[in-house]
Amino acid sequence: MNTKAGEPTSAIYGVSTLLLKLLREERPHGVAWAKDSPRTFRHEAFDGYKAGRARMPDELRSQLGRLSELLAASGAPAFEAAGFEADDVLATLASEVSDAGTRVRIVSGDRDLFQTVGPLVDVLFVGRRGADAKIYDEREVLARFGIAPEQRPSFVALVGDATDNLPSVRGVGEKTASSLIRRFGGVGALLEHLQDVTPTHVREAIRAAAEQMRRTEELARLRRDVPLPPGPRFALPSKDAFSNLRALFVELEFTSLLPRLAKVAAGQA
């Protein structure tokens, strides 16, 4: 998608569509955004972290400024913390808000956030384009991965994460990994009881990868203590925000979104 002047807009259109869909269907008490810091503590701890990722296409990079405009126009707080990923920010926000007794629904396409799931927190997983979104609560995480949400970093320590360039343990697949984590609880306990692991080739593979596993588990664990500025943790678009969104949609030639925006605004009035 491009404007008549040739400005790429497909990514911003996608985020705008998702925002309106969530406001219409989820009817939340408020919304918050989280943004990545360019370089995080994980890059400092592991030079290979996220290495090998393709460079962001220029067409997508050119839309980052418009993304900031969209976030500002929405009227919802947008959080970013130097040295931390958006996932860490979301984990911290979810912890703060749920600790106060409010239900939280994280919207993301990143499975790392499944570790934040708890009694008051679930994840609306928006996967590949065209795939249906799915809500993951504690039961769904257990059914899909065979482990409790908080055990996901230990699971990743065994199976790796190609997206983040986190290595796997040779010969250990998801089924074996989930079985081991259910049995031992985490990497530390697994390594302490290696003598109880069978078959032999799995035991020796884990022994050889012990330090790698400890590092990966720590890198995969989201932080819930990100320093965030004081102020509201979430907010709904105000009347002025809806006006700002409309002005931005008109500028970006999102004509098809204007009736949807009007319906959402009327529903919140």
Image: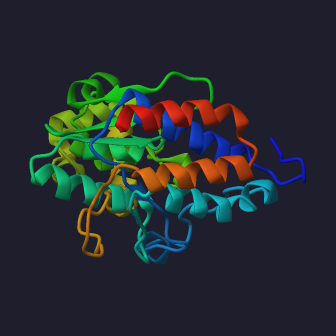
Q: Which residue lies furthest to the right in this view?
A: 5
Q: Nearer the viewer, residue 110 or 169?
A: 110
Q: Residue 54 placed where, x, y %?
A: 72, 56
The correct choice, above or below, for 39 with respect to 112 in the image is below
Image quadrant in which the N terminus is located? top right
Image quadrant in which the C terminus is located? top left
- Whether residue 127 appears in this view of the structure is no
Q: Which of 269 and 208 is in front in this view?
A: 269
Q: Residue 188 placed where, x, y %?
A: 20, 55
The correct choice, above or below, for 111 with respect to 34 in the image is above
Q: Residue 240 placed where, x, y %?
A: 46, 56
- What residue do we see at 27% from left, 27% from top? 146
The correct choice, above or below, for 225 with respect to 240 in the image is below
| Drawn side of residue 107 relative to residue 247, left or right | left
- What residue do we see at 59% from left, 62% from top? 69
Q: Nearer the viewer, residue 3 or 129?
A: 3
Q: Which colour scheme is used?
A: rainbow
Q: Residue 148 placed where, x, y %?
A: 21, 36
- What residue do we see at 56% from left, 31% from top? 260
Residue 29: which quarter of the image? top left
- What residue do we see at 16% from left, 39% from top? 120
Residue 128: which quarter of the image? top right
| Drawn side of residue 20 relative to residue 116, left or right | right
